[in-house]
Amino acid sequence: MASRNIRLAVVAGDGIGPEVVAEGLKVLDVIAGQYDLAIEKTSYDLGAARWHRTGEVLPDSVLEEIRGQDAILLGAVGDPTVPSGTLERGLLLKLRFALDHYVNLRPVKLFPGVETPLAGVTPEDIDMIVVREGTEGPYTGVGGVLRKGTPHEIATQESVNTAFGVERVIRYAFQIAASRPRRKLTLVHKDNVLTFAGELYQRILKQVAAEFPEVTTDYVHVDAATMFFVNNPARFDVIVTDNLFGDIITDIGAAIAGGIGLAASGNVNPDKTAPSMFEPVHGSAPDIAGQSKADPTATILSVAMLLEHLGLPEAARKIEHAVGADLTERSGARSTQQIGDDIAKRVAG
Ligand code: NAI
Ligand code: MG
């Protein structure tokens, strides 16, 4: 009998989702053999295909079943044939809110051998982690529309920030910062214009900072942050920011660290009151779906984050090292499956 049982919900999703998830699971199976893990996978058919077939996005019964799992691996959902927002709000955001994924963790790390569009930048310059708030800000859906379709239409989309929500994400960011060699935490916001929310973030940052005297803190406006990502990424170690700003700056982060095919993420419930969800930052890429052209590396790195979250840091490091070695020696075009095979082989040692 395996020493540890892990119940894994697999939501492969649409487009390239199933292709990259298959490679993530391939690597996970190798790790499972090495660490005596029994991975009990349950696949959930969710996404554009199900919506077209049944009109369902995320039935409550499925959500409750997923709640009983230990973790979730998600590929990507979305398709141009589904009205915008249907799956983003009804599936992704519903999972993040219902399972209280209040930390959206997005490492931005340039691996050796990977090309960055930035001139003169080395892996030492790009090694940060963005802690994006996941359950509040402008993404809560608070707001509405009046007089729709008329010249007098009114659309409001409010940013919701609670002291409770801001404090817990800031405390988590401090813990991450305290565990890293540089021990630096930067708040990214726009407190000169979004004065109510910005001031709340600033005030709570100062309060929580008292518990972490070893961590230095600073503040950067989000617009300036986008500039520093490009001309001075080395200034960042750990960033804490709200939902929308985090969404935007991590796309720049993915771009400077070798592209969307490498960017991993975790939707984390640090209190472990519900399963956390790990997924590549990219979407379903309908333009390359079904052609074995997708890079599964982001998904494989997301599997490493999943293992780390489940308390298996050694297994996580092993996958990261295998990915690092694969990236260093990368040359020529390989299929999705070939990249997965090559990384799995390195993990197998
Ligand atoms: P996308 O990330 O799917 O694609 C953007 C570009 O990056 C495309 O040219 C694509 O071919 C390329 N790309 C993406 N992943 C790649 C990979 N692993 N390897 C190589 N190239 C890759 O973003 P896009 O086109 O804006 O959205 C497509 C669909 O995905 C939409 O329906 C969108 O709503 C959805 N989406 C879903 C997300 C999720 O499930 N978490 C996140 C982002 C978008
Ligand atoms: Mg995004």
Image: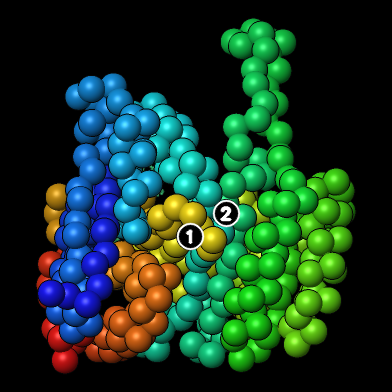
Q: Would residue 208 be found to the left or right of residue 236 on screen? A: right
**Residue at horizontal 23 percent and vertical 22 percent from the top:** 54
**Residue at horizontal 23 percent and vertical 31 percent from the top:** 50
Amino acid beneath label 2: Tyr
In percent of width and height, residue 224 lies at: 74, 64
Q: Quadrant of the C terminus?
A: bottom left
Disc 1 on helix, strand or loop? loop
Q: Is tag 2's residue or tag 1's residue first in the polypeptide sequence?
A: 2
Q: Quadrant of the N terminus?
A: bottom left
Front one among 67 and 171: 67
Q: Does the residue at mark 2 contact the one at mark 1 (Cβ under 8 Å)?
A: no
- The image quarter containing residue 187 is bottom right
Q: Would residue 235 be found to the left or right of residue 274 on screen? A: right
Front one among 258 and 321: 321
Q: Would residue 46 be found to the left or right of residue 308 on screen? A: left
Q: What's the colour scheme?
A: rainbow
- The image quarter containing residue 78 is top left
The furthest residue to the front: 1
In percent of width and height, residue 205 lies at: 79, 66
Q: Which residue is mark 2?
A: 102
Numbered marks: total: 2
In percent of width and height, residue 56 lies at: 30, 26
Q: Which residue is mark 1?
A: 272
Amino acid beneath label 1: Lys
Q: Would residue 337 be found to the left or right of residue 283 on screen? A: left
Mark 2 or mark 1, whichever is nearer to me = 1
Q: Residues within 10 Å of mark 2 (few under 14, many from 20)?
A: many
**Residue at horizontal 60 percent and vertical 40 percent from the top:** 139
Vertical comparison of 236 with 161: above or below: below
**Residue at horizontal 83 percent and vertical 53 percent from the top:** 200
Q: Residues within 10 Å of mark 1 (few under 14, many from 20)?
A: some
